[in-house]
Image (spheres, coloured by chain):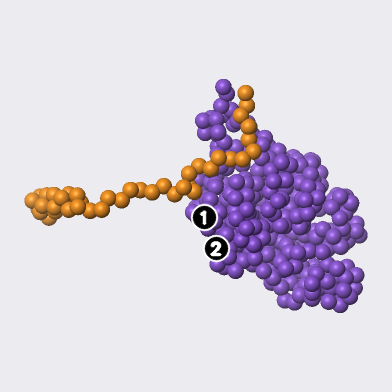
């Protein structure tokens, strides 16, 4: 009998001979059985404002217990966390943090949620899933910041315990995903639709990179797709690029480009469009009905919140999100 | 230190160690390899 295995977690579908490690660097074939190399061994453990993920319509003003292990299913040339996402687990300093300890620490530090973030949480699926199950039992919410490059079956299983997801929609063409990320767009769009269908609170982040994905026609197409397939209420964050990893030759995204992208998204019908990674008035939330400022943010800090029971304090319009 | 002093301490240490409590190295169950979900064996 063959001892070759195939991983079915993400669309990479790695076929692994004995002792071979997956493309994401976190799964190994040991004598015909696939094992995780990162279970309970995060390389990053932090307490962050939920706004940092970013989530603008989810438990605003709270802190989230954030964990990540090394590894990623993609290899984006512009990765902003490449020191850990593109590293092998054995090359990172790790903590001994089994799932129950993560939840206990989250409660001890008064965090309302646990975030699986920084790198690609799909690579530590088993660790994330076990932690999420315990967290749900102990009334702590779970959030994921992911590239959405995951197969339908594992994602569907995960959605039972995931309260919110922020998915990176890195571009809106197969060409961009193939050349810049070594992946493909189609599975990401499938994940977005599934998360929405399974009633996981969904927000989207688009890192706008000068010359690579800042074409306004493509941004318009992306926003129209979001409005049509996910709904106009889904918050979209246009995030500022800074030169990192293999794209140090490019400048940071000009503020004008981000502002134009935001205008394009609003024109395409989206109601909640944010600009991130830069101090800007579009970090704040505005009521789509009366246009008044609802949540004033500076960086990751909330200065005022005018949403009461999920409604605008000024005109009583319902504001979608999970607020408490 | 002379050779004789070294041997004195060495043998005294060896004898005392026999009376010490033996501690077994524990294995943290969480650090055992975790079998992955979502994979199949190819035939």
Residue carrying label 1:
A97
Chain given the colour purple: A
Residue A150 placement: quadrant: top right
Packing grade of label 2 (10 A; few <14, some 14-19, many >=20) is: some
Disc 1 and disc 2: Cα gap in Å? Answer: 10 Å
The image shows residue B26, relative to residue A316, as above or below, that is above
SS label for mark 2? helix
Q: Position of residue A295 (x, y in %)?
A: 77, 72
- Residue furthest to the left in view is B4
Looking at the image, residue A218 sits to the left or right of residue A97; the answer is right
The answer to the question of whether label 1 and label 2 lie on touching residues, with beta carbons closer than 8 A, is yes
- Residue furthest to the front in view is A137
Q: Quadrant of the C terminus of chain A?
A: bottom right
Q: Position of residue A162 (x, y in %)?
A: 69, 54
Residue B6, can we see it? no
Chain identity of mark 2: A
Q: Position of residue A299 (x, y in %)?
A: 70, 69
SS label for mark 1? loop
Residue A191, can we see it? yes
Chain identity of mark 1: A
Q: Quadrant of the N terminus of chain A?
A: top right
Q: Marks 1 and 2: same chain?
A: yes
Q: Work out whether mark 1 precedes mark 2 in sequence or the reverse, and give the earlier one.
A: 1
User: Which residue is depicted at the point 68% across and 64% down?
Assistant: A50
Question: Residue A105 got which mark?
Answer: 2
Image hue for chain B: orange
- Nearer to me, A126 or A149: A126
């Amino acid at each position: 009998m063959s001892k070759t295995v195939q991983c079915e977690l993400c669309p990479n579908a790695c076929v692994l001979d004995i002792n071979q490690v997956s493309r994401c660097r976190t799964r190994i074939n040991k004598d015909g059985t696939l094992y995780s190399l990162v279970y309970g061994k995060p390389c990053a453990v932090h307490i962050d404002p939920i706004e940092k993920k970013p989530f603008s319509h989810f438990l605003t003003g709270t802190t989230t217990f954030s964990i990540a292990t090394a590894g990623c299913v993609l290899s984006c040339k512009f990765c902003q966390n490449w020191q850990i996402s593109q590293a092998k687990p054995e090359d990172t300093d790790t903590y001994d943090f089994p799932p129950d300890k993560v939840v206990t620490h989250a409660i001890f530090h008064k965090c309302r949620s646990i975030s699986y973030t920084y790198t690609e949480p799909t690579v530590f699926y088993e660790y994330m899933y076990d932690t999420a199950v315990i967290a749900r039992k102990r009334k702590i919410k779970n959030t994921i910041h992911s590239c959405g490059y995951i197969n339908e079956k594992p994602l569907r299983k995960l959605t039972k315990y995931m309260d919110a997801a922020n998915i990176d929609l890195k571009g809106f063409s197969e060409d961009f995903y193939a050349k810049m990320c070594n992946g493909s767009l189609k599975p990401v769009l499938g994940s977005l639709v599934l998360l929405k269908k399974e009633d996981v609170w969904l927000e989207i982040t688009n890192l706008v990179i000068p010359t690579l994905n800042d074409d306004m026609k493509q941004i318009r197409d992306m926003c129209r797709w979001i409005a049509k397939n996910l709904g106009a209420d889904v918050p979209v964050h246009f995030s500022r690029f800074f030169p990192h990893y293999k794209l140090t030759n490019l400048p940071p995204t000009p503020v004008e480009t981000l502002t134009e992208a935001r205008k394009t998204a609003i024109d395409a019908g989206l109601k909640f469009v944010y600009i991130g990674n830069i101090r800007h008035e579009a970090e704040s939330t505005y009521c789509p009905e009366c246009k008044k400022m609802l949540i004033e943010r500076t960086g990751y800090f909330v200065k005022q919140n005018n949403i009461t029971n999920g409604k605008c304090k000024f005109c009583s319009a319902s504001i979608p999100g999970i607020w408490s | 230190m002379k050779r004789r002093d070294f041997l004195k301490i060495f043998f005294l240490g060896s004898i005392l160690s026999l009376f010490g409590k033996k501690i077994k190295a524990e294995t943290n169950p969480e650090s055992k390899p975790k079998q992955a979900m979502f994979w199949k064996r190819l035939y």
